[in-house]
Image (cartoon, helix red, strand yellow):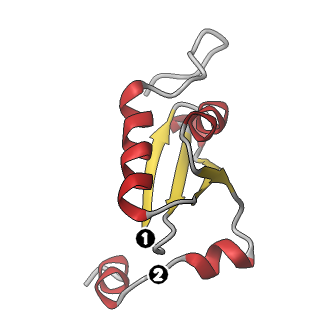
Amino acid sequence: MAEQSEETPQVPTARQVTAARQFVAAHGKPSKAVVENIGRVGARVVLVGADGALGDVVVVSTQAGEALVEQVDDLETASWDAETVNATVIGPAHRRRMAGR
């Protein structure tokens, strides 16, 4: 696993930006993004669509995650507050998968 340094680019890749744009296009505007630090691996940008769908993009750092949100039209920075949590729609199939069944 590569360690981050000051020389590590703190920007998302074109592929990561495209994935976030495709998510917004598929799941409605505006969509929300919660940037979460996941340690040495970087950061996870959790996407919540206007239709309640969940998605994610893993980037090199929280700074890159914030830059990703800024580069995608109709993607808003959010936190796991009541509004964001209540916007998610988690169906029975997703719950079973998360439970390991």
Q: Residue furthest left?
A: 101
Figure check: 82 above or below 27: below
Residue 17 image position (x, y, % from top left): 45, 35
The amino acid type of the residue labelled 1 equals Ala
Figure check: 72 above or below 85: above
SS category of the residue bearing label 2: loop
Residue 31 image position (x, y, % from top left): 55, 59
SS category of the residue bearing label 1: loop
Residue beneath the point at 43% across and 70% down = 53
Relative side of 23 to 50, left or right? left
Q: Count the numbered circles shown.
A: 2
The picture quadrant where one finds residue 13 is top left
Image disc number at residue 31: none
The amino acid type of the residue labelled 2 equals Val
Q: Which residue is mark 2?
A: 89
Q: Which residue is mark 1?
A: 53
Figure check: 29 above or below 22: below
